[in-house]
């Protein structure tokens, strides 16, 4: 007889962070809210899920917790944890949108299935094509010289990729920050992320200027909704343009591929609503010759482990990842041992399931509301 999901616990937590973050849209200080999902089966296997919703980007933590607790709980109660596609289709029928909630549910089901079969989640996705994922660290501290010191120290331990957040200061200040960063870490691949921070009318001139400094790529210079202008910018520049906020789902990716909005795409589980949907996006992108990047909002170890398994098993997510928050930006995560970062790369977890276990004390300290 198949196992069944028996107990469902949804917990809203607030995680203190170590440094302020400034970006093209929305800044972050003090704490990030997350939702932790614990599914327990009748046979006693526990699966962990995590959702992080960032308000200027997509949803909210409170809405995510309510979505799971009030609207998706009936789909999960009694579900067969090995019937992941069917359960996720049921979630889509029960509730539109809320990709963060759905991503948390799907990863908890994968965690249960992996633990049940004794294999890591990436083995359930066809097996690993890479054991380590190059890590990008985001330069977003309003105290820029603190970030320069950090970057210098990080290259000493093997880091080779940085992503500078731009678009919240003047273009001249962004150019000079780029040059100072390049001087501090001359060997590194420096990428730029505007987080939609430029207007369509100013973008061509500003981007010609920053492109002359040869960043590795330029991420989402203008707001979602202006994809025709994004395509024109991509065609104009000889530096790759990467779409993030413009691509949430497979339909967006299909249009991006057909209309050539961008040269590369950022995949985030919190945008796609889970691993299986992320793989559809990566497959469409691959067919169009568009490589993908492992982006994040503010997830901790559980959600980042899920994303690491996805990237391990998906050849076309080949531009690295930015899974640095628990290690470098959060004061404490709620897992016992987070993702291992070595020599500038994230090691793909090898233990059964996601490979993450809750730190009960930290989890309790960060809990704001349990439902
Ligand atoms: Mg981005």
Image (cartoon, rainbow, N blue to C red):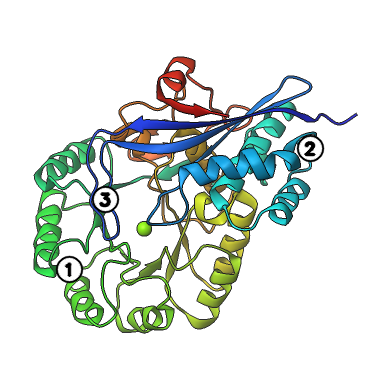
**Where is mark 1, residue-wise?**
213
Residue placed furthest toward the right: 1
Mark 1 and mark 2: Cα distance apart in space: 53 Å
Mark 3 within 8 Å of ligand 1, using the beta carbon: no
Give the structural element (helix, strand or loop) at label 1: loop
**Do we see residue 339 in this rendering?**
no
> Is residue 160 placed above or below 301 in the rendered structure?
below
Residue 7 figure quarter: top right
Decide if residue 48 is on the left or right side of residue 347. Answer: right
Give the labeled residue for mark 3.
Answer: 27
Rendering coords of residue 95 (x, y %): 66, 54
Q: Which residue is drawn at 73% across and 27% down?
A: 116
Number of numbered labels in the structure image: 3
Residue 48, relative to residue 259: is it above or below? above
Between residue 288 and residue 357, name the one nearer to us.
357
The residue shown at (42%, 52%) is 295
User: Quick one: SS at disc 3?
Assistant: loop
Task: Residue 120: name its quadrant.
Answer: top right
Indicate which disc residue 79 carries.
2
Coordinates of residue 350 in the picture (x, y in percent): 56, 30
Is 150 or 75 nearer to us in this picture? 75
In terms of image quarters, where does ligand 1 lie? bottom left
Q: Considering depth in this image, is 88 or 165 the residue closer to the camera?
A: 88
**Label 1 vs label 2, nearer the camera:** 2
């Amino acid at each position: 007889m198949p196992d069944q999901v028996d107990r469902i616990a949804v917990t809203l937590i607030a995680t203190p962070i170590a440094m302020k973050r400034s970006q093209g849209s929305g800044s972050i200080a003090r704490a990030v809210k997350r939702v932790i999902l614990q599914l327990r089966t009748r046979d006693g296997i526990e699966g962990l899920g995590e959702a992080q919703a960032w308000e200027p980007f997509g949803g909210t933590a409170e809405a995510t917790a309510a979505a799971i607790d009030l609207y998706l709980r009936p789909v999960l109660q009694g579900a067969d944890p090995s019937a992941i596609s069917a359960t996720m289709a049921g979630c889509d029928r029960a509730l539109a949108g809320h990709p963060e909630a759905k991503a948390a549910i799907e990863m908890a089901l994968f965690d249960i299935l992996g633990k049940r079969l004794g294999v890591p989640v990436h083995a359930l996705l066809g097996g690993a094509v890479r054991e380590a994922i190059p890590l990008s660290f985001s330069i977003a501290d309003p105290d820029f010289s603190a970030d320069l010191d950090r970057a210098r120290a990080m290259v000493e331990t093997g880091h080779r990729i940085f992503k500078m957040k731009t678009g919240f200061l003047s273009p001249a200040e962004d150019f000079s920050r780029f040059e100072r960063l390049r001087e501090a870490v001359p060997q590194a691949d420096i990428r730029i992320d505007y987080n939609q921070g430029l207007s369509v009318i100013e973008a061509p001139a500003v981007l010609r200027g920053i492109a002359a400094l040869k960043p590795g790529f330029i991420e989402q210079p203008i707001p979602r909704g202006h994809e025709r202008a994004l395509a024109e910018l991509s065609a104009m520049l000889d530096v790759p343009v990467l779409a993030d906020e413009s691509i949430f789902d497979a339909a967006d990716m299909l249009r991006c591929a057909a209309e050539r909005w961008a040269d590369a795409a950022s995949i985030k589980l919190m945008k796609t609503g889970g691993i299986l949907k992320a793989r559809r996006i990566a497959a469409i992108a691959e067919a169009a010759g568009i490589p993908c990047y492992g982006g994040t909002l503010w997830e901790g170890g559980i959600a980042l482990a899920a994303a690491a398994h996805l990237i391990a098993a998906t050849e076309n997510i080949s531009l690295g990842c930015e899974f640095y928050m628990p290690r470098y930006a959060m004061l404490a995560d709620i897992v016992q041992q987070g993702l291992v970062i070595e020599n500038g790369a994230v090691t793909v977890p090898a233990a059964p399931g996601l490979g993450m276990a809750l730190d009960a004390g930290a989890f309790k300290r960060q809990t704001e509301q349990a439902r």
